[in-house]
Image (tube, grey):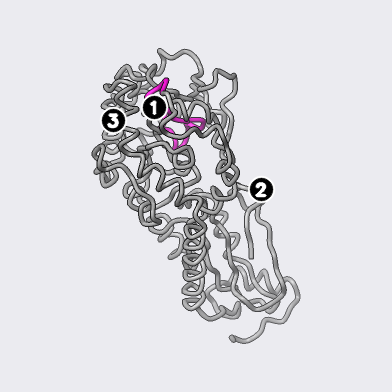
């Protein structure tokens, strides 16, 4: 088995190997982060070259957290991995947020008094997450920023200045230059870091709910997921934060990920606003549809939002109780076991390095002065 350490690492130098010296397949655990075709090539190429003590390329299972994924399918084909997916972040969230079940700061719904109409966390805003800068720009343009709690920095702690990241989207995702320029100009007016709790640093709070008191004081949680542009089902712990806090939410993620969440037994809010945004394939149209929902929410008074919360209380309580129900995690565990059994059944025979398919590995093996076996 090989996996990446520390948590969230993605580079070959972060690979850790557990080898019992047996003849079993290689289980490559790439289940913490989304699969990105070109970015991950070096990593997957390194793992693919692993051989056993007899010089045979190990048949490999790619353990991942994407049920459907264009990028994953290309990696599977390119490196002949066998697919095994499961909902990794369900287990992570269940571990990280287990104590909130006993947290008295998560007030009963009827005791809440809203100060803001929405909340959204946006710490990393470069690379594929640059869409979060577009979200904040749209909130500024519609004069909605002061009606919510928003974290956002003009200088992303990992990717640098927001304007450089936004201009990269023109080439990477073929966004109109004039529109990106408009977003840059809009964000220039901020001139400062936005932080929900007024601290100087926007913290990475994956393993906690973060600014819990501010979540409780706001009505709608705008979840900005890790993946947004791609064709894939991939959700992280972020989607479970409003569920644990008993908040309604809209999801800025890849298309059809609300449907993915519902497939695990959670309920969403199509009774109260148009959730067809989840089916919109075009990322920018999907983002605009979510912003329209936020705008409609902001047009309501805080008292109207309190009444709306009471109407959706059955959904909020169901999601909270289902998240803490052992049956939910048991179902996720069964999915993992079933998919792993299926992957093992699909494994190809071991590949001998005597074949001409892998001359580089064959030469590498011979340099170790071992005798290469015949095909088995």
- Residue bounds of the magenta highlight: 114-133
Q: Give the class, few, some or many, for how many residues have Cα within 10 Å of label 2's Cα (few <14, many ≥20).
A: few
Q: Earlier in the sequence, mark 2 or mark 1?
A: 2
The x and y percentages for residue 368 are: 74, 72
Residue 200, placed above or below residue 87: above
Residue plotted at (65% across, 55% down): 15
Q: Nearer the viewer, mark 2 or mark 1?
A: 1
Q: Which residue is mark 1?
A: 118
Name the residue nearer the viewer: 204 or 169: 204
Q: Secondary structure at mark 3?
A: loop
User: Of the numbered discs in the image, which one, if any, rests on residue 176?
Assistant: 3
Q: Secondary structure at mark 1?
A: strand
Q: Is residue 161 left or right of residue 49?
A: left
Q: Is residue 155 left or right of residue 295?
A: right
Distance of label 3 from label 1 (alpha carbons): 29 Å
Q: Earlier in the sequence, mark 3 or mark 1?
A: 1
């Amino acid at each position: 088995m090989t996996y990446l350490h520390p948590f969230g690492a993605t580079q070959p130098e972060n690979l850790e190997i557990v080898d019992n010296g047996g003849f079993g397949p290689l289980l490559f655990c790439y289940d913490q982060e989304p699969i990105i075709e070109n970015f991950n090539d070096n990593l997957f190429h390194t793992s693919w070259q692993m051989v056993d003590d007899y010089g045979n390329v190990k048949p490999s299972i790619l353990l991942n957290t994407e049920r459907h994924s264009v990028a994953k399918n290309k990696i599977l084909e390119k490196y002949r991995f066998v697919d095994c997916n499961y909902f990794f972040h369900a287990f992570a969230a269940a571990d990280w947020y287990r104590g909130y079940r006993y947290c008295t700061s998560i007030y009963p719904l009827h005791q809440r008094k809203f100060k803001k109409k929405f909340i959204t966390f946006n710490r990393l805003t470069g690379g594929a997450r640059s869409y979060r800068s577009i979200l904040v720009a749209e909130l500024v343009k519609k004069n909605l920023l002061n009606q919510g709690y928003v974290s956002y920095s003009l200088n992303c702690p990992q990717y640098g200045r927001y304007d450089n990241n936004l201009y990269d989207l023109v080439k990477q995702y073929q966004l109109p230059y004039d529109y990106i320029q408009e977003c840059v100009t809009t964000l220039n007016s901020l001139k400062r870091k936005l932080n929900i709790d007024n601290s100087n640093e926007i913290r990475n709070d994956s393993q906690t709910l973060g600014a819990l008191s501010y979540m409780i004081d706001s009505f709608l949680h705008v979840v900005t997921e890790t993946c947004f542009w791609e064709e894939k089902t991939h959700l992280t712990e972020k989607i479970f934060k409003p569920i644990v806090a008993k908040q309604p939410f809209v999801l800025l993620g890849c298309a059809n990920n609300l449907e993915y969440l519902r497939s695990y037994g959670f309920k969403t809010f199509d009774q109260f606003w148009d959730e067809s945004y989840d089916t919109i394939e075009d990322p920018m149209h999907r983002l605009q549809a979510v912003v329209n929902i936020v705008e409609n929410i902001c047009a309501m008074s805080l008292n109207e939002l309190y009444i709306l919360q009471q109407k959706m209380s059955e959904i909020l309580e169901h999601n909270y109780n289902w998240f803490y129900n052992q049956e939910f995690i048991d179902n996720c565990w069964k999915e993992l076991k079933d998919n792993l059994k299926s992957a093992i059944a699909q494994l190809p025979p071991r590949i001998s390095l005597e074949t001409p398919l892998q001359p580089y590995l064959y030469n590498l093996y011979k340099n170790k002065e071992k005798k290469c076996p015949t095909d088995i």
